[in-house]
Amino acid sequence: MTYTNKNIHINGMDIKPGQNAQVSLNWYQLPTKTVIEIPVYVFRSKNPGPVLLILAGMHGDEINGIEIVRRLITRDDVKKPLCGSIIAIPVINIISFLSGSRDLPDGRDLNRCFPGTKNGSLGGRIAYDLMNEIIPQIDFGIDFHTGGAKISNYPQLRCVFTNKVNLDLGKKFSPALIINSPFRENTLRKEASRKGKSILVFEGGESSRFDYLSINEGMNGCIRLMKHLKMLKTDIPNNPTVLLHKSTWVRAKSSGLFHTSKTNGAHILKGEIIGKICDPYGEHDEKLISPTDGYIVGINNQPVVNQGDALMHIGIEE
């Protein structure tokens, strides 16, 4: 692929090849007249190359991704790429980050607000600014996420296997697990794909809690991808990667106390006992049986569960 070396233009500022800059994506006023700005960091080489977006904090309680991007932008080799440009947004959803919540103050999920509208809701305006100020100027992107409340995700990358560019980028990121994940409507990944931009989604850990395995894996994967794009040099080795073509959830068939001796990321076999649910009065235990061979890609850490709750997410090879 041939890359040009044009100026990057964000919110009225031109960043030329060889320059670094911090600029605000836009500013948003709260009811208290407090102004919220979203910082964007741009690191540019003088040499032509790809423009890579690294973004986190789509949900305000997903702090593992925020820590990954924070660590990346403190590295000298990231600040001085050998070619191309890096656009980093450590926290895209500043308002939800301040309150430690997943959703925006109006209850909307920012990652269901794309492509957004210029004069719409707060989430719609943030999505619109990202789609119009940043996405047209990038070649590839990584959107860092974390598991939901009480759900811990094993470090994993999600991409669309039928999209050759998407899958190739995922393999160069080289996580232990890559899950085939179809596009969802009104998400950044889906709307960016409409513009011909390939976005990978990294998932790792649990919301509102640091998971250092996930942080290290996300950071190392990003560095491996940058090495593949010739943006920096590194000796971080690749992981042996397993491709998971689909996934399923094991749900609680009764209410009670959930126990498991299995660890996140473990390989399990169909028919294997993967946990049990006990009632708090010692009257019965119910065994949880794996419905398939696969890898545990997510575990519910909530000890008290209700019938129908999702307990284990299992990724399945073809």
Image: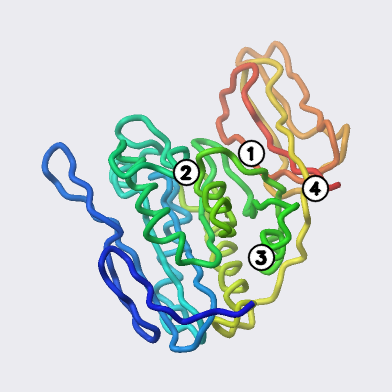
Marked residue nearer the N-terminal end (2 or 4): 2
Q: Along the line of sight, which residue is nearer the eye, 286 or 231?
A: 231
Q: Residue 299 carries which label?
A: 1
Check disc 3 and report the residue beneath it: 169
Q: Earlier in the sequence, mark 1 or mark 4?
A: 4
Label 4 sits on a secondary structure element that is: strand
Whole-Å distance between the Cαs marked 3 and 4? 25 Å
Q: At 67% from the left edge and 46% from the top edge, which residue is drawn?
A: 264
Give left or right: position of 13 versus 54: left
**Residue under label 2:** 207
**Label 1 close to label 2 by CB (< 8 Å):** no
Q: Percent from the top left, x then y, of residue 185?
A: 55, 38
* Label 1 – label 3 distance at C-alpha: 27 Å
- Which of the labelled discs sits on residue 190, or is there none? none
Q: Is residue 230 above or below residue 186?
A: below
Question: Do tag 2 and tag 4 residues touch (Cβ < 8 Å)?
Answer: no
Q: In this view, does 249 lie above or below 141?
A: above
